[in-house]
């Protein structure tokens, strides 16, 4: 028997709820059971609907989590509509622009806000004003060659292959979504008609060596800074990227917590998934990475200094959380739930790579034992360096040759992608003896300690 529910505009703390969100309570006991979000949309025939979505307290674990999920869902729908909103038309006159508007309203709420805004900017700038944007779905069904013609026109305009690839990946995704939503209007499968331009790689993945990474870390620690804590943090971030097999900057910046660290590994997990949120930092979902001693020691040194100043850090605190004079920064969600750690914004990260990483890399490149090309190394190349070290180590190389499966799993690549991206490094080490990763890292650190290099990068603003 279904429960009789009563809707109110007051949450479990006695605060008024945002517009389009209501609390649902049992009529007999008054117990709060869920929060419901309602929004407005038109169906395929232009009829006005008022759909809704409920977020159960029992399933999500607590009223705070349920309210956070409802607020996030409602905010995503509103933001998507604000970024890109077009009048929904009857199916017979739907255009690609209209389908994109539906895609943003109904599908983008399941994506990260940063990604949704990026796609909206790309469509508005590169697609909406072109003929493909105003093309009706019925026209595409009747004359599929129109898509091929539009691809040829972008080539004739001289658009770079990378930009054309971005455009047609989005168009393909939107039209395939539109075919599932309007199968009687868009009656053809568009995937085979859209050929994504091949991505020509003009630069092979650069990989330094363990000594080169240690020289950069040395420069990080020696750079002028008004606070030693920031130098320890910067050195820990470089070590975490270069001596962990294998991670991405976004994973350390937005996902890694102190509770994820183990003795020899770091475990990345989507904790926000339970509450309906998507964690932007994890590109490939939950996974584990191999943590080498050089990374673990720098991370623990940073944590020791952090806790000496600001007290013990909880397990769910981000390792590289935003810092100010009072310590790691915590914020409260708009729903009024518990505090959450504040991750580095993208602008802060970009500033850090330009000022802090760039100056330390240039200083390290002047060391007499620095590997060739270190002065042009990007921060993302630390990931390539970690994979390169693993490629000629006992982790991969054995008596019967190379076994790429363990490394591919840690790197989040298929075997084919790993071979394609790092073929020049694989060839470099064919026939060479395998190294011990921990011994290689220890030797590099000892070399830097025995022969320090005094070049000091310029002062950089703390992130």
Image: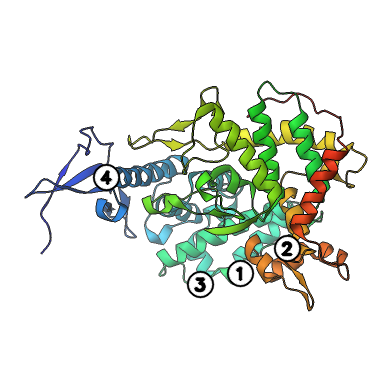
Q: Nearer the viewer, mark 3 or mark 2?
A: 2
Label ID, residue 188: 3
Read off the residue under disc 1.
193
Q: Nearer the viewer, mark 2 or mark 4?
A: 4
Read off the residue under disc 4.
63
Which badge, 2 or 4, comes first in the chain's sequence? 4
Against 224, is 244 above or below? below
Q: Secondary structure at mark 4?
A: helix
In three-dimensional space, the C-alpha distance between marks 2 and 4, rounded to whole angstroms, equals 49 Å
Which badge, 2 or 1, comes first in the chain's sequence? 1
In three-dimensional space, the C-alpha distance between marks 3 and 4, rounded to whole angstroms, equals 45 Å
Against 310, is 22 above or below? below
Pick out the residue farthest to the left: 28
In three-dimensional space, the C-alpha distance between marks 1 and 4, rounded to whole angstroms, equals 48 Å
Which badge, 1 or 4, comes first in the chain's sequence? 4
In three-dimensional space, the C-alpha distance between marks 3 and 1, rounded to whole angstroms, equals 10 Å
Q: Viewed as shown, does residue 141 lie left or right of 239?
A: left
Dots 2, 4 in contact, CB < 8 A: no
Q: Secondary structure at mark 1?
A: helix
Q: Secondary structure at mark 2?
A: loop
Q: Residues within 10 Å of mark 2 (few under 14, many from 20)?
A: few
Which badge, 3 or 1, comes first in the chain's sequence? 3
State the residue at coordinates (86%, 67%): 433
On the rendered image, what quadrant is the N terminus found in? bottom left
Q: Nearer the viewer, mark 2 or mark 1?
A: 2
State the residue at coordinates (73%, 44%): 379
Which badge, 3 or 2, comes first in the chain's sequence? 3
On the rendered image, what quadrant is the C terminus found in? top right
Label ID, residue 198: 2
Report x, y in % for residue 321.
54, 36
Against 173, is 308 above or below? above
Pick out the residue farthest to the bottom: 400
């Amino acid at each position: 028997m279904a429960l009789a529910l009563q809707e109110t505009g007051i949450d479990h703390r006695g605060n008024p709820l945002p517009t389009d969100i209501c609390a649902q309570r049992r009529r007999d006991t008054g117990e709060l059971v869920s929060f419901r979000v309602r929004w407005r949309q038109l169906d395929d025939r232009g009829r006005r609907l008022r759909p809704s979505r409920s977020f159960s307290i029992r399933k999500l674990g607590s009223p705070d989590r349920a309210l956070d999920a409802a607020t996030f869902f409602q905010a995503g729908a509103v933001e998507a509509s604000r970024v890109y909103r077009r009048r929904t038309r009857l199916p017979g006159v739907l255009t690609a622009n209209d389908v994109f508007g539906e895609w943003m309203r109904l599908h983008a709420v399941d994506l990260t806000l940063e990604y949704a805004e990026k796609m909206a900017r790309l469509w508005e700038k590169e697609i909406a004003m072109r003929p493909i944007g105003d093309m009706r779905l019925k026209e595409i069904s009747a004359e599929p060659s129109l898509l091929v013609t539009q691809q040829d026109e972008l080539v004739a305009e001289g658009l770079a292959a990378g930009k054309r690839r971005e455009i047609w990946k989005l168009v393909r995704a939107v039209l395939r979504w539109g075919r599932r939503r309007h199968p009687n209007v868009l009656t053809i499968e568009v995937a085979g008609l859209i050929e994504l331009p091949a991505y020509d790689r003009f630069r092979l993945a650069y990989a330094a060596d363990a000594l080169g990474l240690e020289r950069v870390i040395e420069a990080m620690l020696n750079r002028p800074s008004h606070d030693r804590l920031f130098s320890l943090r910067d050195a820990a971030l470089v070590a975490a990227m270069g001596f962990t097999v294998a991670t991405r900057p976004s994973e350390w910046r937005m996902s890694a917590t102190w509770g994820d660290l183990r003795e020899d590994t770091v475990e990345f997990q989507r904790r926000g998934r339970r509450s309906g949120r998507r964690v932007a930092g994890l590109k490939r979902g939950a996974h584990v990475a191999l943590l080498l001693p050089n990374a673990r020691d720098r991370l623990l040194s940073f944590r020791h200094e952090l806790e000496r100043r600001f007290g013990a850090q909880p397990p769910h605190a981000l390792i590289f959380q935003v810092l100010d004079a009072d310590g790691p920064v915590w914020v409260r969600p708009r729903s009024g739930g518990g505090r959450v750690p504040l991750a580095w914004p993208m602008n802060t990260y970009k500033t850090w790579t330009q000022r802090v990483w760039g100056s330390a890399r240039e200083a390290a490149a002047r060391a007499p034992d620095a590997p060739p090309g270190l002065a042009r190394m990007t921060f993302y190349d630390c990931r390539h360096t970690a994979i390169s070290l693993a490629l000629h180590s006992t982790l991969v190389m054995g008596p019967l040759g190379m076994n790429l499966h363990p490394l591919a799993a840690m790197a989040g690549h298929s075997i084919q992608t790993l071979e394609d991206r790092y073929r020049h490094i694989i060839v470099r080490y064919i026939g060479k003896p395998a190294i011990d990763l921990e011994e290689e890292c220890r030797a590099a650190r000892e070399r830097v300690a025995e022969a320090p290099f005094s070049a000091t990068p310029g002062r950089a603003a703390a992130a």
